[in-house]
Each structure stands twice: as C-alpha cells, then as structure tokens.
Image (cartoon, rainbow, N blue to C red):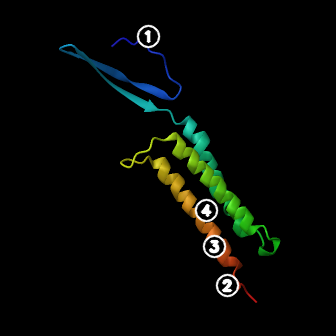
C-alpha cells in the first residue's frame, strides 16, 4: 500500500507492510504500530533506577545523624509519585500489565523494605550497647 499521506506520530511507529482488504462495502486495514519508548525511559525508568541506587545511601548514613529515616521516607515518597505518574499514563486494565508496571512496583516494594529496615536498625533491641 502507498502511504503518501501518512504523517509520522511522535509516540508511535507504523510497522510495514500495511494490508488492505476490501470485503463487500468494508475496507479492512491490518496494520501494526509500535510504541516508541523514549518517553517512558525518561519519565519512569531513569528516575526509578536513580532512586533505587540512592536507596543504598540510607545504609551508609550514620544512625546518629538523625537523617537516616528522613532520607529513606523521602526516596520512598519520590518513588510513589513516579508510580502515580505511571498510573495516570497507562489505561486502567486488570487483564494485562506492562513489564514497566512490574519494574516500578518492585522498586517501590524495595524502597518500602529499606524504610522498614531503617526502622528496625534504629530499634534498641538490635543496636549494640
């Protein structure tokens, strides 16, 4: 098929070939489009990976500084905002989840565990006397 009037979209790429079938009074187009990943890489994947790496800072900070828990909670809240951004972008469906959702969900769970371990580490039962 000749695609002279097709205009490239910034978020989608049209895969060729495009098949056209004419059945009775209907025209059936069989086309494949591919989502371009740059937006999700920039808005979701890179910030989540940075927050994941920053979560190790919580264990490097001394407990006496008093900033250990505030750093952990701030990183967790930043990840929750990223997760909410993803929820706003993707359509609500319970059947198929993109791999990106699982990636962000696992990082959020990891950051929540970092906060829990930070709390456990501050308990008097687990500190050396």
Is the C-beta separation of discs 3 and 1 under 8 Å? no
Q: Which residue is identified by label 4?
A: 111
Tell me which label, 3 or 1, sits earlier in the chain: 1
The furthest residue to the bottom: 129
Residue at image point 62% right, 54% down: 79
Quadrant in which the N terminus appears: top left
Tell me which label, 1 or 4, sits earlier in the chain: 1
Is the C-beta separation of discs 1 and 4 under 8 Å? no
Distance from disc 2 to disc 1, alpha carbons, whole Å, reads: 69 Å
Distance from disc 3 to disc 2, alpha carbons, whole Å, reads: 11 Å
Residue 23 percent coordinates (x, y): 19, 16
Nearer to me, 59 or 84: 84
Q: Secondary structure at mark 1?
A: loop
CA neighbours of label 2 inside 10 A, class few (<14), some (14 to 19), many (20+)? few
Q: Secondary structure at mark 4?
A: helix
Distance from disc 3 to disc 1, alpha carbons, whole Å, reads: 58 Å
Residue 7 percent coordinates (x, y): 48, 16
Q: Which residue is identified by label 2?
A: 126
Horizontal side, residue 93 vs residue 123: left or right? left
Tell me which label, 3 or 2, sits earlier in the chain: 3
Q: Which residue is identified by label 1?
A: 5
């Amino acid at each position: 098929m000749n695609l002279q009037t097709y205009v490239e979209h910034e978020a989608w790429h049209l895969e060729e070939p495009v098949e056209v079938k004419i059945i009775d009074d209907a025209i059936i187009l069989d086309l494949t489009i591919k989502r371009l990943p740059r937006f999700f890489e920039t808005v979701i994947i890179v910030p989540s990976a940075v927050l994941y790496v920053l979560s190790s800072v919580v264990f490097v900070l001394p407990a006496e500084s008093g900033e250990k828990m505030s750093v952990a909670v701030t990183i967790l809240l930043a990840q929750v905002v990223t997760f909410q951004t993803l929820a706003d972008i993707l359509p609500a469906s319970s059947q198929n989840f993109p791999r990106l959702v699982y990636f962000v969900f696992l990082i959020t769970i990891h950051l929540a565990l970092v906060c829990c371990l930070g709390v456990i580490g501050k308990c008097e039962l687990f500190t050396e006397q």
